[in-house]
Amino acid sequence: MLQAEVKSKFGEDVSIAIYPDNCKWNYIVDCGEASLLTVKDCMNARAIFISHTHIDHFINFDQIMRHQVGSKERYIICGPKNIALQVQAKLKSFTWNLVEEDAVVYEIREIISEDLIKVYEMKPAEWELEFLEDRTALYNDERVVVNFMILDHKTDVIAYHFKDNDSINIDVTKIPYKPGKWINELKLAYMSDDVNKVIEVGTEEHIAEELFHYLKVEKGNSLGVILDHAAHEENHNKIKQLFHDCDTVLIETFYKEEDKEKAILNYHSYASQSGKIMFESNVKKAIPVHFSRKYTEEDVESIKVDFYKAFEGSY
């Protein structure tokens, strides 16, 4: 199960942490001002996903990086065109003469298009960009697969879709056999749909399909983060394509309904349009986030009212 937490307080920018259950690591989406983001969040961030590098989404990268250098870990940073040079510029702006080369490694995955991602690596103290490869898939590990879509905000903005892997368990108190390595072999057979695999259970041999009924499969949830985007048809078609039937989506809702002309002018979304596209995408749970800093808390509550009216299909 993936859980998202907004780490920015009212009046701050936007940064979101995503926690997979029963894991020591997390993921971070965007690096705006976020006083609720902890040192542990930064150090345990296996990957950072940047939507775009407007200042309110990237200003806090320095603070996150400060807690990672010295960990000797490899961190992955995903983001739009030019993200490699922008991360490099931030790192090169400091003096690193007392930091060893193995203090940290940053792997940058730069999204050039929806079919091309360029991968680079950087290490202290010179922080030179070393090209590694071209790839098409953005990110996956033992828990999640992350897909993306490029949206229009008068610059590329990356919307991210996280899918938690299904979990496969077995209740050893309800099986008539002694637990052993056969359980993992059975799980692997199930995941690879190898129904005819021979599984050795003690001194007996079984066809995998005969044992599948002992497995309990829990479907992994899906989680989306959609930040700054113009509320126009092209963006909405892309959102519906990637986030259709998503379990939970956090979506930018920058402007009040009465300020929609400003939203259109500035390539942002606004209350009814963010709620409406979530309704049309059949999202199960939609959460409005990232409101203009000019608004009061009362204004934000009115944005949420209009958002949820549209999300419920009644606006």
Image (tube, grey):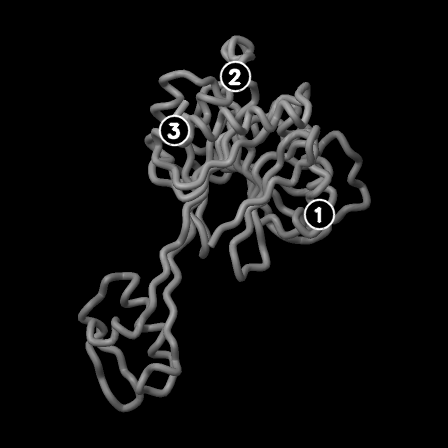
Q: What's under tag 1, amino acid-wise?
A: Thr
Which corner quadrant of the image does residue 197 belong to?
bottom left
In the picture provided, is 183 more to the left or to the right than 104? left
Which corner quadrant of the image does residue 266 belong to?
top right
Foreground of the two, 66 or 257: 257
Q: What's under tag 2, amino acid-wise?
A: Glu
Q: Is residue 120 visible?
A: no
The image position of residue 206, as x and y in percent, is 21, 81
**Of callouts 2 and 3, which one flags the residue occurring earlier in the amino acid sequence?**
3
Mark 2 or mark 1: which is in front? 2
Q: Residue at x 71, y 47 (%)?
A: 38
Where is 81 relative to 200, above or below? above
Q: Residue at x 52, y 16 (%)?
A: 257
Q: Residue at x 22, y 65 (%)?
A: 194
The image position of residue 44, as x and y in percent, is 63, 52
The image position of residue 308, as x and y in percent, is 47, 30
Circle 2: element type: helix
Pointers 2 and 3 in contact (C-beta within 8 Å): no
**Of callouts 2 and 1, which one flags the residue occurring earlier in the amino acid sequence?**
1
Q: What's under tag 3, amino acid-wise?
A: Ile
The image position of residue 136, as x and y in percent, is 38, 37
The label number, if any, that marks residue 38 in the structure image: 1
In the picture provided, is 148 more to the left or to the right than 127? left
Circle 1: element type: loop
Circle 3: element type: helix
Where is 225 relative to 180, above or below? above
> Within 10 angstroms of label 3, few (less than 14), some, or many (20 or more) residues?
many
Mark 2 or mark 3: which is in front? 2
Foreground of the two, 184 or 162: 162
The label number, if any, that marks residue 239 in the structure image: 3
The label number, if any, that marks residue 257 in the structure image: 2
